[in-house]
Amino acid sequence: MLQAAKSKAADRLKILRFLKSQLDSAAKDKLADLTDEEVQKVLQRKIKQSLEARDKFTAGQRPELAAAEQAEIDLVSQYLPKPLSTEELKAIVDELVLSANAKTMKDFGRVMGQVMKRVGARASGADVKAAIERALSQ
C-alpha cells in the first residue's frame, strides 16, 4: 500500500485498502490472526465478486466498468498462489479417486472434500467439480 501511495496509483491503492479492510474484518470476526489459507479464501471471495460484477457490466454494455473489475481481478490474483494446470488437477483427482476407491457419483462428496483439502486455493471449486465428474464418469 505504501508503494502504491508513493507512486500515486490511486486505483491500486483503493483496491489494496479495500482488501486490507476485508482481511482486518475477517481477523476481527475470528478473534485471531488469519492463516495463509484464510487470507487466500478472502482474496478468492473478492475475485469471485469481481468476476460476477465484470460479467454483469459486460452484459449491461458497460465496458469501462467491466475493465475496472478486470483490473481488480488482475491485481488480487497477484497475491494468490499460481493455479494448478488442468493436467496437474487431473492427476490429483485421479490419484484421490483411486485411493478412495470411488466408482460412482455417490462417492462424489467424499472425493470432493479430499481434493479441496489437497489443492486449497490453487483450483476453483467449479474446476475441481468438473474434474471429479469427468473421472467418475469414465
Image (spheres, rainbow, N blue to C red):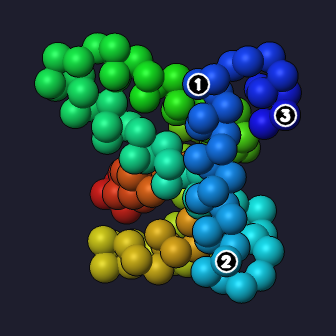
Say which quadrant the N terminus sits in. top right
Residue type at mark 3 is Leu
Contact (CB < 8 A) between labels 2 and 1?
A: no
Quickly name the residue at label 2. 28
Classify mark 2: residues with Cα within 10 Å, few (<14), some (14-19) or many (20+): few
Q: What whole-number distance in Å separates the C-alpha atoms at marks 2 and 3?
A: 23 Å
- In this rendering, the answer to whether 27 lies above or below 81 is below
Classify mark 1: residues with Cα within 10 Å, few (<14), some (14-19) or many (20+): some
Q: Going from the N terminus, do you reach mark 2 or mark 1 first? A: 1
**Would residue 126 appear left or right of 40 to someone viewing this image?**
left
Residue type at mark 1 is Asp
Q: Residue at x 79, y 74 (%)?
A: 33
- In this rendering, the answer to whether 87 lies above or below 29 is above
Who is closer to the viewer here, 121 or 4?
Answer: 4
Residue type at mark 2 is Lys
Q: Residue at x 35, y 57 (%)?
A: 133
The picture places residue 42, in percent across and down from the top left corner, at 58, 58
**Would residue 34 appear left or right of 16 to someone viewing this image?**
right
- In this rendering, the answer to whether 104 lies above or below 43 is below
Quickly name the residue at label 1. 11
Q: Going from the N terminus, do you reach mark 2 or mark 3 first? A: 3
Determine whether the residue tagged by mark 2 lies in a helix, strand or loop.
helix
Who is closer to the viewer here, 99 or 108?
Answer: 108
Quickly name the residue at label 3. 2
Q: Going from the N terminus, do you reach mark 3 or mark 1 first? A: 3
Who is closer to the viewer here, 114 or 105?
Answer: 114
